[in-house]
Amino acid sequence: MPVFKNETSGTWYVMARYTDWTGTRKQKCKRGFATKREAQEWERSFQMQTSSDMDMTFEAFAQLYEQDMRPRLKENSWLTKENIIQKKILPYFGQRKISEITTKDVIAWQNELLAFRDERHQPYSQTYLKTLHNQLSAIFNHAVRFYNLRSNPAAKARNMGNEERKEMLFWTKEEYQKFADAMMDKPMSFYAFEMLYWCGIREGELLALTPADFDFEKGTVKISKSYQRLHGQDVITSPKTKKSNRTIKMPKFLCEEMQDYLGMLYGVKKKDRIFTVTKSYLHHEMDRGAKAAGVKRIRIHDLRHSHISLLIDMGFSAVAIADRVGHESIEITYRYAHLFPSKQTEMVEKLELERSET
């Protein structure tokens, strides 16, 4: 893999030939090195990457990890990972050889994060600490599974945080109706919150809706995409999970409301977004409406909890609710177990009846 000097610009470049994972011979040219030594260091790192040599630095392996994982993830999911890797992991491990990082090193990294305090003297949350450790462990696991690293030192160190269940807030139907009355001065806001509360859809699913998603003859809305704002651009992605692809039946009053709303939109096409606002706008509107209605402030996502709690109160099963909101039924049962009425008394009465009939 020769290193050359560009006599015109005075910089150095590398011409690299290698065999990719399919067995195809390829060539890569990397330009713009200020010195021969920088070019040679890049050459050595590239050789290690292409040969899966675990003497490479953690930073070099992180680049391999990105090449392998980024195409498999949604862009917003990768950006979350990338932020953690760049800001919390590489500054500590980046220049270390990945094969030489020990459990003791991981514990020292954990201790630095545990000792952190922000300007208000607050530590990182337990959930965030767990997320940081999980990402480090995921990189080591990838190296073990696919690149023959001997073991995962992060797994031996064990996790440093716990997942904190955020308090589940929700509005009763009466609280929501007070809020909705306060929102009627802004039609777009009113109809957006109607869809969120009465259909239990996610914020990104709401913001991706188009006229083509509605079938008013059947009284349905199709959920097949999600809206994200990435790199300053509007991005439409697939929904959060496969289960999230679903068709939701809407009550008659909501069909009529949405027909009225679509009729207000001038020049809107079948594939145009009908709620052309940001998540930030909805959060500000939530602040405004809750204050005007005199109800407690909940998060936008808590409207989804409110919808689910309403359905539970109406007597619907976890399976039926899961189909409507795009969850697995086991998740509904686990997260909302305290809201389901206890069947213990009814079970005992039926067991007594069975016993008396024998």
Image: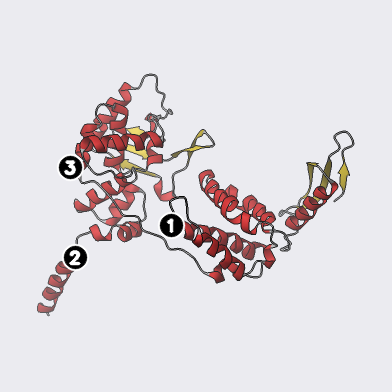
Please state which of the two labelled residues, at mark 1 or mark 2, is closer to the viewer.
1
Residue at image x 37%, y 37%?
206
Q: Is residue 312 left or right of residue 125?
A: left
The answer to whether mark 1 and mark 3 are in CB contact below 8 A is no
Task: Report the mark closest to the observer, 1 or 3.
Answer: 1
**Residue 259: x percent and y percent?**
28, 27
Which callout, 1 or 3, points at the residue further toward the start of the chain? 1
The secondary structure type at the circle numbered 3 is helix
Q: Which residue is mark 2?
A: 343
Instruction: Confirm whether residue 218 shows in the render.
Output: no
**Alpha-carbon distance for marks 1 and 3?**
34 Å
Mark 1 neighbour density, 10 Å: few (under 14) some (14–19) many (20 or more): some
Residue farthest bottom in this picture: 358
Give neighbour class at mark 3: few <14, some 14-19, many 20+ (Cα, 10 Å): few
| 195 lies left or right of 272 | left
Distance from disc 2 to disc 3, alpha carbons, whole Å, reads 27 Å
The residue lying toward the viewer, choosing from 324 and 3, is 3
Q: Is residue 136 visible?
A: yes
Quarter of the view holding residue 284? top left
Q: Earlier in the sequence, mark 2 or mark 3?
A: 3
Residue 203, image quadrant: top left
Task: Residue at 47% x, 60% y: name it.
Answer: 130
Left or right, 88 with reference to 32: left
Q: Is residue 92 above or below residue 258?
A: below
Quarter of the rendering occupied by the C terminus: bottom left
Give the labeled residue for mark 1. Answer: 125
- Colour approach in the figure: secondary structure
Foreground: disc 2 or disc 3: 3
In primary-sequence order, the first of circles 1 and 2 is 1
Q: Position of residue 319 (x, y in %)?
A: 30, 55
Q: Which residue is mark 3?
A: 174
**Circle 2 — which element?**
loop
